[in-house]
Image (cartoon, rainbow, N blue to C red):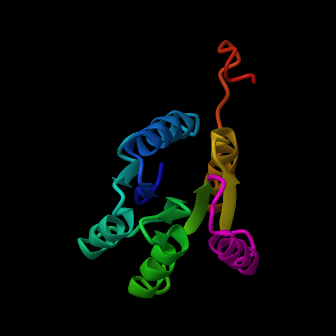
Amino acid sequence: MLSEPIHILIADDKKEICDSLEDNLKIEAEKYLLTDKDVIIHKAFTEHAYEHGCNVVKNGLRPNICIFDLVFNGYTGVDLYRWINNQLPGLKINLCIYTGVEKKFDKRKEAEVLASATGGAIRIVAKPNISEILDWFDDVIESRYGLVKTIDETDPFDLL
């Protein structure tokens, strides 16, 4: 179906959040008839998520879709996104910043300014709105990859 797999990088300082996002994205990808060979998910889930994210890119990852926490251990998801863009110029990355109520409003404002400047390539979603992340993921899959979601009308959850 796809000529190349979609690589997703999830970075958060909490493993549980990364695991939950991974599980939900896999279920959503299946609705587009995408398999584990079509969508490959990479996770960086310690308080040093920024450094781990940088390392996976240094080791060859070229992420198409990124979901990053706003703040982890002095760095932000915006910092990681900018670093990746500097390392991989020309790579089109769709980014979702998944954030709680941040004590540092300047970091949130920086993310909002960047999101506004990218014309939709970046979305900010407040925790715990995972359904909003999945809606964003659907938009990316449909607009960027031209795929159509299949709905199983015998499955009541698909009809929601």
Q: Magenta residues?
A: 100-121
**138 with respect to 11 (left or right):** right
**122 with respect to 69 (left or right):** right
Where residue 37 sits in the image (x, y, percent)?
35, 46
* Residue drawn 76% across the image and 75% down it: 116
Judge whether 89 appears above or below 136 on screen.
below
Q: Nearer the viewer, residue 87 or 99?
A: 99
Number of labels in the image equals 0
* Residue drawn 62% across the image and 52% down it: 100
- Which residue of the protein is positioned furthest toward the front in this rendering? 103
Judge whether 20 appears above or below 116 on screen.
above
Q: Nearer the viewer, residue 78 or 39?
A: 78
Which quadrant of the view contains residue 107?
bottom right
**5 with respect to 127 (left or right):** left
- Which residue of the protein is positioned furthest toward the left in this rendering? 59
Q: Nearer the viewer, residue 96 or 39?
A: 96
Which quadrant of the view contains residue 92?
bottom right
Q: Nearer the viewer, residue 140 or 19?
A: 19
Where residue 82 sits in the image (x, y, percent)?
50, 81
* Residue drawn 30% across the image and 65% down it: 52
Quadrant (top left, top right, bottom left, bottom right) of the C terminus: top right
**16 with respect to 107 (left or right):** left
Visible in this render: residue 152? yes
Q: Is residue 58 magenta?
A: no
Judge whether 156 appears above or below 43 on screen.
above
Where residue 5 sits in the image (x, y, percent)?
40, 56
Where residue 144 sits in the image (x, y, percent)?
63, 62
Visible in this render: residue 145? no
